[in-house]
C-alpha cells in the first residue's frame, strides 16, 4: 500500500487525526488506502454446538490484526461498521438471526496484540432447528450485511460474505 496516502490524512487541515480522517472519508479519499492498512483475522473461535431457545450461550473468540495499522471503526464516519455473529439457514446460507456485538470493537485490534472476548448471545427469536454459526463485520446502514473483508480463505465465506464457523442445533 501507499503508506504516504494514509500518513498524509493526518497532515492536512488542523492536524487532528480524527477530524481529518472523518473529513477525508466523507469525501471518499480514504477508501483506497484504508483497504490495505489492516488484516483482521479470527485465529480462535469456540462456538456451542447446541443450545435451547431463549437460553444464553457463550462464544469465545480471539482476533489478530496482521496489518500495520488499525481498522478505524472508532472514527465517527466508520462507526456504522460493527462486529456480528449470525445463525445462518443451512440451506440458503442467509442469516436467520444476526447478533450485533456492541462490546467488540475492531478498532481495538492492533498488530502484535491479540484481543480476546467471550460474547454472550441469547437465542431469542430463534426457532428450533439446525443452523450454521457465522461472523462478519457488518454495515449497520445496509441491513447488517458483511462489509469489511477479513483475512480468511475465500472458500470459508458464504456468497454474502459471512465467515462460516460451524453447526449448532437449537432445541
Image (cartoon, helix red, strand yellow):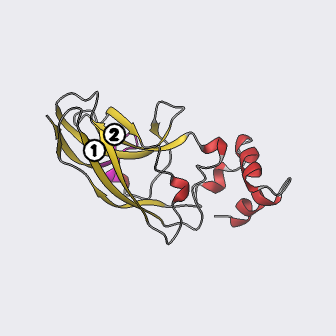
Structural crowding at the residue carrying mark 2, measured as other residues with C-alpha within 10 Å and reported as few (<14), some (14–19) or many (≥20): many
Tell me: 168 left or right of 59.
left
Position in image of residue 61 (x %, y %): 35, 57
Judge whether residue 161 is colored magenta: yes
Most foreground residue, 32 or 124: 124
Tell me: 148 left or right of 45.
right
Q: Earlier in the sequence, mark 1 or mark 2?
A: 2
Q: Is residue 149 above or below residue 142?
A: below
> Disc 1, disc 2: CB below 8 Å?
yes
* Residue located at (50% from left, 48% from top): 148
Tell me: 143 left or right of 75.
left
**Label 1 residue SS:** strand
- The residue to which callout 2 is attached is 86
Quarter of the figure that contains the C terminus:
top left
Q: Main secondary structure of the magenta part?
A: loop
Q: Is residue 99 above or below residue 71?
A: above
Position in image of residue 74 (x %, y %): 61, 50
Check the image and name the residue furthest to the bottom. Answer: 112
Which residues are drawn in magenta? 155-164
**Label 2 residue SS:** strand
* Residue located at (34% from left, 43% from top): 158
* Count of numbered labels shown in the rendering: 2
Q: How many angstroms separate mark 1 from mark 2 (CA)? A: 6 Å
Q: Is residue 168 above or below residue 150?
A: above
Position in image of residue 132 (x %, y %): 24, 42
Q: Is residue 121 above or below residue 35?
A: above
**Mark number, residue 133:** 1
Judge whether residue 116 is colored magenta: no
Quarter of the figure that contains the N terminus:
bottom right
Position in image of residue 25 (x %, y %): 70, 45
Amino acid at each position: 500500500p501507499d503508506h504516504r496516502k494514509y500518513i498524509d490524512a493526518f497532515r492536512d487541515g488542523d492536524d487532528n487525526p480524527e477530524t481529518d480522517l472523518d473529513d477525508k472519508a466523507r469525501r471518499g479519499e480514504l477508501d483506497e488506502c484504508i483497504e490495505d492498512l489492516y488484516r483482521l483475522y479470527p485465529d480462535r473461535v469456540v462456538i456451542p454446538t447446541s443450545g435451547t431457545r431463549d437460553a444464553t450461550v457463550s462464544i469465545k473468540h480471539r482476533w489478530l490484526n496482521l496489518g500495520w495499522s488499525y481498522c478505524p471503526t472508532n472514527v465517527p464516519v466508520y462507526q456504522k461498521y460493527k462486529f456480528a455473529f449470525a445463525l445462518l439457514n443451512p440451506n440458503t446460507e442467509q442469516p436467520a438471526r444476526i447478533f450485533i456485538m456492541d462490546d467488540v470493537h475492531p478498532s481495538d485490534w492492533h498488530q502484535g496484540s491479540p484481543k480476546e472476548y467471550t460474547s454472550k448471545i441469547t437465542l431469542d427469536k430463534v426457532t428450533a432447528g439446525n443452523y450454521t454459526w457465522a461472523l462478519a463485520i457488518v454495515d449497520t446502514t445496509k441491513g447488517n450485511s458483511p462489509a469489511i473483508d477479513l483475512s480468511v480463505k475465500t472458500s470459508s465465506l458464504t456468497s454474502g460474505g459471512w465467515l462460516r464457523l460451524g453447526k449448532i442445533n437449537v432445541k
